[in-house]
Image: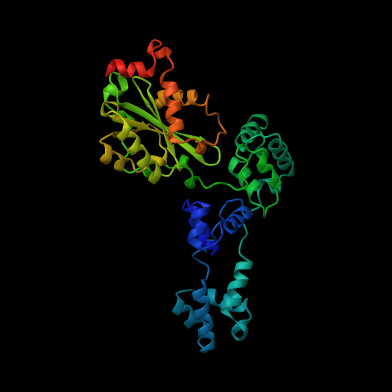
């Protein structure tokens, strides 16, 4: 079960998905992950010159049949000296057992070399002190490079520090120091399981912002929208759509941020709009719009994606979201707001004058243009 759990975790599945796939409670899955800090144990790779379990079983059967060591070696494609040493170190011809020999080989296998922190108590104490001061592993590594530039013994990678924090079996750094990190997570989250690692390569048919019409870039006509999600407390979210020319805002209630929920909600919002106010949509790299092709088919709206980690390419939407935060500050549970509530808030902002519109309101700008 654990092998399948780690295989799924490496593939980027969430704890809830893993629990459903294994038929186990999410708490049981989390317990296994937490014990290892979310870091999958290294898979032991058997060297090609080491005997396998199958080869040891062949040796055992050959000995029981009275075959010579040389003939056994020929049958498994190994040197006779290898078979001879294998039999001699595991009880000889009479006492040799494949399973016992395999267990002995695993116990005597070369162990990983000791950690840098394990070999250097001075470095270990300094790292613990800086972590306790809420420094990140990257900041610690950079600090050591500056203050101990000529001392190779005071060098360590940030990944080694993370592993020392989250890998409990080493007991090199107190586990509670994970609460001093910015995320305060009890386990190391799999990057594949985050939106951060899911860019254009995983959004089929994603069109880059460079292909957007010039009218959208120049803000010369209505209907070119920028969109994004605002995330609230208790896993709540809403979508915001802002017209680049008029700054006219539309807010959309969302029960979840999964693409199977977001796409139909946006489709419904676009259906309510005047056709002249919906031509293109520019979104960030969030996987909530992975089903963008379905949105285009249903509404005729061309969808474009900004470059990764480039919020300035959707500056109109980002600035409008800041205005929304005046009414819905961070930490607000957005799920308590109905679509009618969001429509009322959008109307309030659409009737506030904007400096960038020569102090006209977005609603006035739309009315004058249409």
Residue at 50% x, 84% y is 62
Q: Is residue 294 above or below residue 243?
A: below
In the image, taking residue 270 as reference, residue 335 lies left or right, namely right
**Residue situated in front as seen by the camera: 197 or 64:** 197
In the image, taking residue 121 as reference, residue 71 lies left or right, namely left
In the image, taking residue 283 as reference, residue 298 lies left or right, namely left
Find residue 299 and report its image quarter: top left
Residue 311 position within the rendered picture, expressed as x and y whole percent measured from the top left: 44, 28
**Residue situated in front as seen by the camera: 329 or 168:** 329
Residue at 31% x, 17% y is 367
Q: Give the residue furthest to the top.
A: 358
Q: What scheme was used to colour the molecule?
A: rainbow
How many marks are shown on the rendered structure? 0
**Residue situated in front as seen by the camera: 367 or 180:** 367
Q: Is residue 146 above or below residue 3?
A: above
Q: Is residue 99 above or below residue 258?
A: below
Find residue 251 and report its image quarter: top left
Residue 280 position within the rendered picture, expressed as x and y whole percent measured from the top left: 30, 30
Q: Is residue 274 above or below residue 254?
A: above
Residue 19 position within the rendered picture, expressed as x and y whole percent measured from the top left: 52, 58
Residue 199 position within the rendered picture, expressed as x and y whole percent measured from the top left: 40, 40
Instruction: Locate the N terminus by quadrant.
Output: bottom right
In the image, taking residue 330 as reference, residue 228 lies left or right, namely left
Residue at 59% x, 75% y is 101
In this view of the protein, can residue 69 be seen by the observer? yes
**Residue situated in front as seen by the camera: 122 or 29:** 29
Instruction: Locate the C terminus by quadrant.
Output: top left
């Amino acid at each position: 079960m654990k092998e399948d759990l780690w295989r799924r975790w490496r593939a980027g599945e969430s704890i809830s998905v893993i629990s459903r796939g294994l038929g186990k409670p999410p708490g049981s899955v989390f317990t296994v992950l937490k014990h290892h800090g979310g870091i999958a144990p290294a898979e032991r790779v058997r060297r090609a010159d080491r005997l396998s379990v199958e080869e040891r079983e062949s040796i055992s059967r050959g000995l029981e049949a009275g075959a010579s060591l040389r003939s056994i070696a020929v049958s498994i494609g190994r040197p006779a000296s290898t078979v001879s040493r294998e039999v001699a170190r595991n009880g000889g011809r009479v006492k040799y057992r494949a399973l016992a020999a395999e267990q002995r080989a695993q116990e005597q296998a070369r162990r990983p070399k000791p950690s840098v922190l394990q070999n250097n108590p001075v470095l270990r104490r300094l790292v613990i002190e800086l972590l306790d001061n809420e420094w990140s592993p990257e900041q610690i590594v950079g600090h050591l490079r500056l203050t101990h530039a000529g001392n190779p013994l005071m060098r360590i990678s940030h990944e080694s520090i993370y592993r020392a924090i989250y890998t409990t079996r080493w007991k090199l750094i107190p586990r509670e120091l994970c609460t001093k990190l910015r995320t305060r997570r009890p386990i190391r989250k799999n990057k594949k399981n985050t939106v951060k690692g899911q860019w254009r390569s995983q959004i089929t048919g994603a069109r880059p912002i460079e292909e957007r019409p010039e009218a959208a870039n120049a803000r010369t006509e209505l209907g070119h929208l920028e969109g994004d999600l605002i995330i609230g407390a208790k896993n709540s979210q809403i979508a915001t759509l802002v017209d680049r020319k008029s700054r006219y805002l539309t807010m959309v209630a969302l029960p979840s941020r999964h693409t199977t929920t977001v796409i139909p909600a946006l489709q419904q919002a676009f259906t309510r709009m005047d056709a002249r106010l919906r031509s293109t949509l520019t979104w960030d790299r969030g996987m909530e719009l992975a089903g963008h092709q379905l949105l285009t088919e249903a509404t005729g709206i061309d969808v474009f994606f900004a470059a990764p980690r480039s919020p300035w390419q959707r500056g109109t939407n980002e600035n409008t979201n800041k205005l929304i935060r005046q009414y819905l500050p961070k930490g607000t549970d957005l799920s308590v707001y109905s679509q009618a509530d969001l429509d009322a808030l959008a109307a309030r902002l659409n009737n506030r004058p904007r400096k960038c519109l020569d102090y006209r309101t977005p609603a006035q700008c739309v009315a004058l243009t249409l």
